[in-house]
Amino acid sequence: MDLNRQLIEAMADLNEDLVIATVRQMAAEGHSFEEIQQCLNTGISAVGTRFERGDYFIADLIVSGMIYRSALNEREPLRSGGAPRPLGKVVIGVVAGDIHDIGKDIIVSLLRAERFDVVDLGIDVKPERFVHAVRNYHPDVVLLSGVLTTAQEAMVQTIQALTDAGLRDQVKVLIGGLCTSEYLMHHVGADGWAYDSNRTVRFCKEVVDAKEAAK
Ligand code: B12
């Protein structure tokens, strides 16, 4: 079996030892961070499908999150030390009612590796906490992360709260996470939507570059 398939199946089967061993082997053989992450994502999606079918339970979801994090820890050091960039500031949080933070944490570490100043508000972040953070930290970008379908409504409320506070024009809003889509971006009135880490970093850099150019 090729290593990609082996990693996907080991993740789906919650076989932590095999996941770690395969990540190490793939790294040693020169597979990219993105390729490894893609396999982990496919594997963890299969965990979700098995949960839906009733083959897995909540405890299995918890374990899948732990294995995913351990696997990423194997690879993360290799991501640090991105090229020097003008620094920008971002505020990020998982919106109200949602506690899925693995994807958000990936985005945080990649933005930090690219020398962005990241204010991480954590999980289950109520709209007023986003408002407070924008008022206090003056970020270039606010990133709203959401996985549950119910997070879509929380995103609507968060952006509405920024508008009501008179802050919407001061900051770009990027949405991301499993529950998001281009359609949702238009629906909630966000400035962008990103389904992976590279697009997220690119969006944030473009915002900062545009601000620099406008000075
Ligand atoms: C692990 C997991 C959990 C763990 C989370 C642990 C943690 N610390 O995050 C725990 C056990 C806590 C959990 C709980 C629940 N879960 Co859950 N969970 C999952 C699972 C298996 C994996 C999610 C994950 O981490 N994926 C990997 C990451 C890397 O992917 P990602 O989040 O999409 O992130 C990537 C991109 O989207 C993007 N990205 C992410 N965030 C952001 C942010 C920005 C700004 C940008 C630009 C990009 C971006 O970059 C990331 C890297 O590529 C999914 C199954 C699946 N298909 O995803 C179910 C799933 C999400 N869970 C589900 C459910 C139902 C629940 C529960 C309601 C179960 C219950 N009955 O209690 C609870 C809800 C708790 C809550 N209030 O949030 C459903 C959601 C259904 C829905 N449509 O709403 C899913 C889809 C499973 C299923 N198929 O039924 N869960």
Image (tube, rainbow, N blue to C red):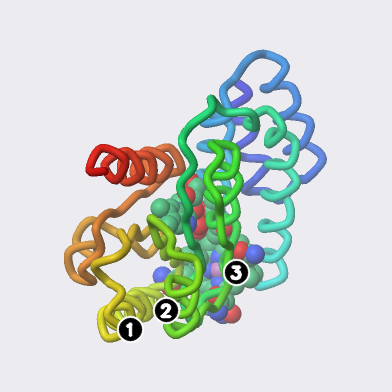
Q: Earlier in the sequence, mark 2 or mark 3?
A: 3
Q: Are marks 2 and 3 in contact (CB under 8 Å)?
A: no
The answer to which image quadrant residue 17 occupies is top right
Residue 100 location in percent, x, y? 56, 67
Q: Is residue 86 above or below residue 109?
A: above
Q: Quadrant of the C terminus?
A: top left
Q: Give the residue type that dot 2 points to.
A: Val
Residue denoted by label 2: 131
In what element is the residue under mark 3? loop
Foreground residue among 88 and 105: 88
Q: CA distance from mark 2 to mark 3?
A: 14 Å
Q: Give the residue type that dot 1 points to.
A: Ala
Q: CA distance from mark 1 to mark 3?
A: 18 Å
Residue 90 visible in image:
yes
Residue denoted by label 1: 161
- The residue depicted at 56 percent of the width and 54 percent of the height is 118
Q: Is mark 1 within 8 Å of ligand 1?
A: no
In what element is the residue under mark 1? helix
Residue 212 location in percent, x, y? 31, 40
In what element is the residue under mark 2? helix
Q: Are marks 1 and 2 in contact (CB under 8 Å)?
A: yes
The answer to which image quadrant residue 77 occupies is top right
